[in-house]
Image (spheres, rainbow, N blue to C red):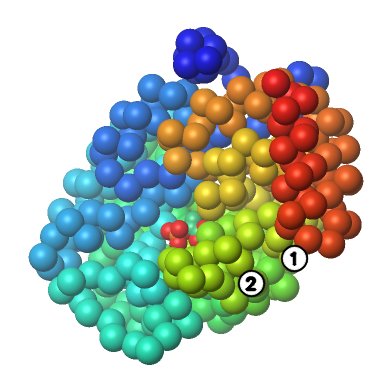
Amino acid sequence: LVKDLEAITHLPCETLDHHRVPLWVNTGLMVDVTRSLERGAEGVGLYRTEVPFLLRDRFPTEEEQRKIYREQLQAFHPHPVTMRTLDVGGDKSLPYFPIEEDNPFLGWRGIRVTLDHPEIFLAQVRAMLKASEGLDNLRIMLPMVSSIAELEAAQVLIYRAFHELLEEDFTISLPPIGVMVEVPAAVYQAREMAARVDFLSVGSNDLTQYLLAVDRNNARVAGLYESRHPAVLRALIDVVQQAHSQGTTVSICGELAGDPGSAMLLVAMGFDVLSMNAANLPRVKAVLRSITLEQAEELLLQVRDLPDAESINHCVQEALKKSG
Ligand code: PEP
Ligand code: MG
């Protein structure tokens, strides 16, 4: 089996009837990049910038960040690299920037933190833009957005950083800007968000946690964290439709994309890109190459009105068995 997976590393990810599904990867460290390239990834759908921040005992300077980001962009060039702005708070806290709250997942996290600290956001965006000079494969993505006002405030800061750098004589272009759909409010405003950005990307880890009100890290309720819960699937279907109604591409970068059975459903829903941990990429590709788009669509039709995750999971397992 391992040999079979290796054999398809440099073949495109497409269904039997030639429907292309670009498979991208989620990265954080340089080792992820090497591993991803070896596995035939076509881009980075989520570079978690908080990872290099976690490895230090203070905020990295703009110049330190520029170097780290440059390495990522260069290693993947000419493939696109989607850099997410700092997503701390919730389960990710920096030792030198402690956030103590009773309810961290509903508290100060993601874009909320960086909009309250524009100096952190601007330094990071400036570092990303400087790093992209001459490469032009940068995309910027905003985490935990729950209103249009937050999105617009972040866009204003990005434009500001961009214009500052033009005045400082950097030769850069404005990168595509995207927003993560990972809180329920963003699902219901996906159309308005899609109209204002270049791409959407669903963060299904947080979206599942918030839709089901199940802490993604709490073992006691782990049994309730159903990644194929009917409510989750319905939200995903809606997001794709709303994004496409605005001509905006939509990807998914949560763990769901790296699960072969779920990947079939995501392809049928119309996701334009699946982004996953490099470790899962070969298996997802093998499964997608073994089915037709029509088979995936039939599976989605079969499960979309089922009442619970258990019956959905059963159908998906059966379809996986059939695909070999
Ligand atoms: C997500 O929430 O699905 C996601 C991709 O982001 P993270 O896991 O870093 O919160
Ligand atoms: Mg998230």
The spot of residue 14 in percent (x, y) is 68, 24
Residue occupying image coordinates x 83% and y 40%: 299
| Residue placed most toward the observer, 197 or 285 | 285
Disc 1 to disc 2, how far (Cα)?
8 Å
List the residue tagged with mark 2.
Answer: 212
The spot of residue 94 in percent (x, y) is 23, 70
Q: Given contact means CB atoms under 8 Å apart, are the residues at marks 1 and 2 in contact?
A: yes
Q: Quadrant of the C terminus?
A: top right
Residue occupying image coordinates x 53% and y 52%: 254
List the residue tagged with mark 1.
Answer: 231
Residue 58 falls in image quadrant? bottom left
What's the residue type where badge 2 is placed?
Leu
Mark 2, ligand 1, within 8 Å: the answer is: no
Residue occupying image coordinates x 39% and y 49%: 47
Rate crowding at label 2 as few (under 14), some (14 to 19) or many (20 or more) other CA atoms within 10 Å.
some
Label 2 sits on a secondary structure element that is helix
Residue 299 seen in the figure: yes
Above or below 102: residue 22? above
How many marks are shown on the rendered structure? 2
